[in-house]
Amino acid sequence: MEDIFNKASSAAQYIELKINKIPTIALSLGTGSSILLDKVHIEARIPYSDIPHFPHSTVATHVNELIVASIGSVPVFILAGRMHYYEGWSTKELTFPVRVMQALKVNKLLLSNAAGALNPSYTQGEIILLKDHINLMPDHPLRGKNDERLGLRFPDMSKGYSASLREMVKMDHAEIKEGVYVGFQGPSLETPAEYKMLHIIGGDLVGMSTVPEVIVANHAEMDVLVFSIATNICYPPENITETTLEEVVEVANQSSVKLVKLVELLLKRINSNQAES
Ligand code: HPA
């Protein structure tokens, strides 16, 4: 995927023509978050396939739309439909939507995902706030020639997960746990020996998404916040049970009411902070 800057600019121009007010916050929600769409006031829906250069899944059952909405009174972009490395996309391709958000001057990216729990204190269905990640995916979205218009050659990752956004979440949910997410390529789930290794190297959760988007959003100097739903217990080995996609989706869906509440409260806090400053 060459000339990301120009491709993202032309996608952004297309989107700008379709909407009145451009949000500064984008949500990219993973498994178990579709009920959010019942809670929002939708202003525009733009199929990914209509947006120049936008990647889109060819699977008919997938929602693949950029939604412009307000939650409470806060305007947001919702990237409904996520591309994954295991589907065959390069991490540059699958992070193109984040580049388009950058071109539209979005400065906050909120993500969610379903993940396996490597930290034995986590319970099934618990929502964890990410504070860091370990990137074990075999592809890097910033590999290749760097375009200075998009960001620095060697972006710092010491503040990859915004401390101020995490503080806002904790104001409403002091008890929420924070964890380290390991990005693994999938699509097979990990073996017990792999889960053990990921626990030993410092992972609290493991999943097949999110890390490329977080890296690109940091390159774009956005503030990033990620919620993970711990859908299956992966450590210690004797607590591992067979895991199917259906179970992951079911557990994630059960937690989605909590997840939506967390997102709503956070947006309210961001909005009142912006009003003060
Ligand atoms: N591994 C990787 N990705 C996942 C898992 C897991 O155990 N659970 C949900 N997504």
Image: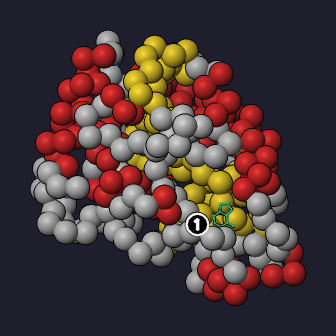
Residue 246 in sight here: yes
The x and y percentages for residue 170 are: 63, 45
Q: Is residue 196 visible?
A: no
User: Foreground: 162 or 211?
Assistant: 211
Q: Quadrant of ligand 1?
A: bottom right
Q: Please give the count of numbered marks on the rendered protein.
A: 1
Identify whether 264 is placed above or below 181. above
Q: Residue at x 55, y 63 (%)?
A: 208
Q: In front: 252, or 65?
A: 65
Q: Is residue 10 above or below residue 17?
A: below
Q: Image check: 191 left or right of 89?
A: right
> Where in the figure is residue 131, as x and y percent of width and height?
54, 60
Depth check, front residue: 164 or 245: 245
Left or right, 272 with reference to 277: right
Q: Amino acid at mark 1?
A: Pro
- Identified at 86% across, 75% down, the residue is 239
161 displayed left or right of 119: left
- Residue marked by disc 1: 187
Q: Position of residue 164 (x, y in %)?
A: 47, 47
In the rendered view of the protein, which quadrant contains the C terminus? top left
The location of residue 180, given as percent across then percent down, is 58, 67
Q: Quadrant of residue 242?
A: bottom right
